[in-house]
Amino acid sequence: MTLLLSRRDLEFLLYDWLDAESLHSEHSRETFDAVLDLAAEVAAEHFAPHNKRADAEEPTFDGGRVHMIPEVRKALDVLAQTGLVASSTELPHVVSTAAFAYFQAANPGTWAYPFLTIAAANLLRAHGTPEQVETYVEPMVEGRFHGTMCLSEPQAGSSLADITTRAEPQADGTYRLFGNKMWISAGEHELGENIVHLVLAKIPGGPPGVKGISLFLVPKLLPDGRRNDIALAGLNHKMGYRGTTNTLLNFGEGAGAVGQLVGPEHGGLACMFHMMNEARVGVGAGAAALGYTGYLKSLDYARTRTQGRATSAKDPAAPPVPIIEHPDVRRMLLAQKCYAEGALALVLYCGRLLDDQNTGPDPDRARLLLDVLTPIAKSWPSQWCVAANDLAIQVHGGYGYTREYDVEQHYRDNRLNPIHEGTHGIQALDLLGRKVVIQGGAGLALLREIVAATCARATTGEAAELAAQLDAVWDRIVAVTARIHADPHPERLADATTYLEAVGHAAVAWIWLEQYLACGDRDEPFHRGKRQAARYFFRRELPRTGPQLDLLAALDRTTVEMEPDWF
Amino acid sequence: MTLLLSRRDLEFLLYDWLDAESLHSEHSRETFDAVLDLAAEVAAEHFAPHNKRADAEEPTFDGGRVHMIPEVRKALDVLAQTGLVASSTELPHVVSTAAFAYFQAANPGTWAYPFLTIAAANLLRAHGTPEQVETYVEPMVEGRFHGTMCLSEPQAGSSLADITTRAEPQADGTYRLFGNKMWISAGEHELGENIVHLVLAKIPGGPPGVKGISLFLVPKLLPDGRRNDIALAGLNHKMGYRGTTNTLLNFGEGAGAVGQLVGPEHGGLACMFHMMNEARVGVGAGAAALGYTGYLKSLDYARTRTQGRATSAKDPAAPPVPIIEHPDVRRMLLAQKCYAEGALALVLYCGRLLDDQNTGPDPDRARLLLDVLTPIAKSWPSQWCVAANDLAIQVHGGYGYTREYDVEQHYRDNRLNPIHEGTHGIQALDLLGRKVVIQGGAGLALLREIVAATCARATTGEAAELAAQLDAVWDRIVAVTARIHADPHPERLADATTYLEAVGHAAVAWIWLEQYLACGDRDEPFHRGKRQAARYFFRRELPRTGPQLDLLAALDRTTVEMEPDWF
C-alpha cells in the first residue's frame, strides 16, 4: 500500500473549499479527477518504489559523468509519456499543485528533475525570446530537455549581491560566462538530451550588488551539439534528497561558457523573482506532501501495531490494543493532521491565487495577497511538516528510526526545505522587511481583510468562538507590525523569524477556520475529523503566538545585545 | 580543531556551581582536572576521527559474525589502556558524567559500547552474587568483556509487561532462556573476549505482567569457552547511531541459552529500574553532549564564514561580514547555548545527586529529588538538543545539510535519544503518573522547595526579577498538578507529554537561574554570556509554558475525544 495523500481530502480542498471547478470553463471536474488519478498512479507505481534505493545509492561521478540508478530515468520517461507536465500548463495551478504533490510525497529526489525543469521552462516562457521558447521550452515540457536554476555560489549562498560569476559580451550578441555555481540541483546527469541552465551572472561595468545581476540561458550542449564550457567540479553529499544530483559547476574553465541573455541586461533578479512565488510555493507544497505521507504512514502503523493496554484496563492479562488507542499517540497523529493538512490547504490556496492572478477578476489583488503569503507558504510547511515527520518517527517508536520504514527518510528529505529557495531567515526578512511594508502596507491590510471576511462568515456557535480567537490574534499582529516598523532601532528586523513564525501560525489557523466552515453541516467522520483538527489547532497551536507576539511587542533586544565574544 | 565541549564551562559548572571539590576528600581538583584532560584528549584523538567513517560504513554481518571498521576496536583498546572506565567507579558521578560527555560528543556510536558495559557492570555490582561480580564485572571495567541490556522484544517495545522470553529452571540452578530480543545495541561484535547480556525474561508459572519478570546474566561465551545458544538474527539499519551494532538476538534456538539469575526471582524489573535513573541521566548527557558539540561547531562557523552586510551598512560594495553579526544567527546561537549548556548543567546536577545519594548527608532526599528529575533529565536534553542540532544545521545553511560537515550527523544521531531508554511519552507518564504522586507528592514538593530556595537567594536586581517569574511558573505547576490528579476522568494522564515539556522548561529555567547566581559579581565575557543566555531563556523559552499550563489547567479533552475513524 502506498500512502501518499488522501484523495478524499484533496477533493474536499479543491471542490468543497476552493471551488476549482469554476476556474476553467473548458475543464470539467472529470478532467481534474483524471489528472489526479493519473498522477497518483504514476507516483505510486513509478516514483515511490525507488525512493529508498535512490536514497541508499546516491549518484556518483567519474570523468565528469554522473551515474545514478536506472529507475530514475525510467520514471521520468513514464512521466513524459503521460504528458502530465506538458498538459499542466493548460490546467489550473491549484489542480497541478495537487497532482504534483503526489510525486513530491512519493519521491522528492526524483521529482526534483521535472520540478526544476518546469520552473525553468516557466521562467523562459515569461522572459525568453520567441526563439528561446521554441528552441528550449518545447523540449523541456516534453521531458526531453531538463532545466536548472544556477543562483548560489560557494561564497554567496543567501547573499546574491555577492555573486562573482561574470558574463563577457561577445560580438555576436552572446556572452561568455566564467564562475563557480554551488548547490546546483540536477546540474549534471544523462536523463535527457540536454540541460538548460538558467544562470545569474554580472556583466562587467554594471551597477554593484543585486542591481548588476543578469540572467543567462546556458545550455549543456550547444545548438551544434558540442559541449559547452561547463565542468562538473563535484557532487554534494547531503543528509537527504540524495536522489537529486547536487553539484558544484564551473562555468568557463576554458574560453567561457556560451550563454544567451534572458530578459534585460541587469534585470536578472527581477526575472528570477518573477518566478519566485511559484517556486517557493512549490517548496512549501513539497514539504506539505512529505508531512502528509509521513502522517498517513504513522496513522496506518498506529492502527495496526498493538502494544500496551487501554487506560481503563487494569488487567495485565488483557490483550494489547492498537496504539492509536493511547491518547499520546492520538495527540501525535492529530498534530500531524493539523500540520500536514493545514500546510497542503495553504499551498493549494496559493495555487488558487496563482490562477486568480492569471485569470481572475482582480489579478492585482490576487498578486498582492500571494506576495504576502508566499514567505509563509514556503516556510510554514517547511518548519511544521518536518515537525510532523518527527512525530511520525515517534509514533513508530524504534522502528521509525530505522531505514526499514519510510518515515526517517521523509524527516531527512524534508529538512532541506527550510534551507533551499531562500532559508527560513530569508523568508522572515522578506515578510517583515518587504512584504508587509510595500505599497504602504497594503499586503498585510489585504490579508487582514481576507481573514476578517472569513471570521465574519463564522457567525454562530463554535465557529464564532474560533473566529473571535482568530480576530484577536490578527488584531495583535497588525498592532505589533506597526510597532516594529515605528521602532527607530537600526536592527528592528532582528526578530523577523519570530514574526514569521507567529504570522505563519495565525495564517494556518485562518486556513483551519476556512476548512471548518467548508464542512458546513455535514457530519461524516471525515468532517468530524476536520473539525477536531481545527479545534486542536486553535487550542494547542494558535496559543503559541501569545508569547511570540508579547516578545515582538516588547521590542526585545536580547539577541542584538549579545556580543560575539560572550559566546 | 575538535570542538566537543567547553572546558571553561565544565569547570564553571563543576567547581563554581556544583562544588565538586567537596565531594571526595581523597580526590583533589587536580585529579578531576587530569581526568577531564585525559577524556578530552582520548575523545578528540581516538573517538572523533572515525565518527564519520563509522556512520558511512555501518556494521555488516555474515554467518553470525559482525564486521565493523577497525578504528572502533582501536579506540576501545586505547580507552581500556587509560583505565578511565575502571577508575570512574572511584570518581564522583558528577566528574565522570562530565568526562564521559567528551566521548558522547565525539562519537556516540563507538561510545555506546563502553556506555552499555558500564551500565551492565553497575547493575551486576548492585545485584549480582560475589561470584558473578568476580567473574564478569572485573573484566568488564577493564574493557575485556562488554555488556548489553536485553529488554525489548519485537512485539513489546515500551510495554515490558508483554515480553514473552521465558527462562526454564534447570536442576543445576541455572536457567535456559528462549525468546527474541529486539533493539539490542552491541548485541554481537568481536570487540572483546566476551559479551555479558543482561536479559529480562519470565520464569513459567510466575505472576502475569511486569511482576513476573526476572533478570538473567547470559554470556555470549560460557565459562568453558563454548558459544551459548544466542543467535544473531539480524541488524537494524538506523538513521543515526550507525556505528553501534543494533541487533535482533534469538535466545534458545536449540537447547536454550544458559543463564544465571541476577537478584530475586520475579524481581527483575526492580533490579533493572535500580539502574534506570543512571542510565536515563546518561541518555540525557549524551543528548546534551551532541547538542553542545553542534553548538560549538556552528559558533565556529558563524565566526569565520562571511556573508551579507551588517544591518547598518547600506553600501552593497561594503565587504561581507562574519555571519555572527546577523541578529538571526545570534538568535540561533543563543538558543543553542541555552539548550546545550542548560542540558549539560541539568545532567551534571543529576550526577551530583547520584553522588549525594551515595555519600551525601541525606541520601533519601537526594534519591527522591533524582527520582523526580530523572524523566526530565532524560527527555529535556533529548528534545531540545535535537532542536539545537537543527539550528546548528540552519546556521551552516546548505553546507550544514551536507555530510562534509558534522552537524547533520549530530542531528541524526541525537534523534535516537527521545526513543531509547523509554520514549518521550514513557518519560511523561513516569513523571506525571508516578514521580509527582509517589510518597504523597513528596517528590514534586521537594523539587518545588529546591527551586524556592534558589529563588530566595536571588534577592536583588535582575536576579530577583527572574526569580519572581520562576516562582510564579512553579506555583502554577503545583496547582496544575493537583488539578490533574483531582480529575476523575480515567484518561487524566492524556496530556502527560505537555506536562513533561512544561515542567522540563521550568526546571531548566531554574538551572539557568542557578547559573546566573553562580556567576556572582564576576563580569568577564564568559559570565556576561551566561547571564545573557539566562535572560534569553527567561524571555523566550520559559513563556512557552504559559499556553501549556493553560491547556493542562483546562483539562482539555481534544485528543481523548478524537475517534480513530475520524482521522
Image (cartoon, coloured by chain):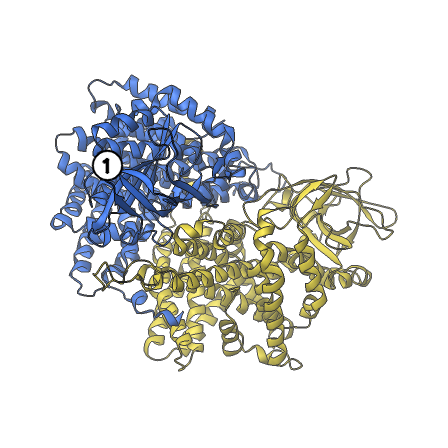
Chain colours: A blue, B yellow
Quadrant for residue A3, please give it.
top left
Residue A404, x across and y down, in percent: 57, 37
As drawn, is A382 to the left or to the right of B310? right
Locate residue A57 relative to residue A276 in the image: left or right. right
Q: Quadrant of the C terminus of chain A?
A: bottom left
Name, please, the residue furthest toward the front.
Answer: A171
| Res. B270 in view | no
- Label 1 crowd (10 A; few <14 / some 14-19 / many >=20): few
Q: Nearer the viewer, residue B264 or A410?
A: A410
Q: Nearer the viewer, residue A116 or A25?
A: A116
* Image side of residue B286 versus residue B69, left or right: left
Q: At 24% across and 19% down in the image, what residue appears?
A: A27
Residue A257: image location, x then y, percent: 34, 40
Image position of B269 with respect to B256: above or below? below
**Which residue in the protein does label 1 denote?**
A172
Q: Amino acid at mark 1?
A: Asp
- Residue B386 vs B10, above or below: the answer is above
- Is A386 situated left or right of A93 in this image? right
Closest to the observer: B240 or A61? A61
The total number of labels drawn is 1
Residue B65 location, x and y as percent?
73, 43
User: Image quadrant of residue A509?
Assistant: top left
Q: Quadrant of residue A218?
A: top left
The chain identifier of the residue carrying mark 1 reads: A
Secondary element at image label 1: loop
Judge whether residue A96 can be spotted in this image: yes
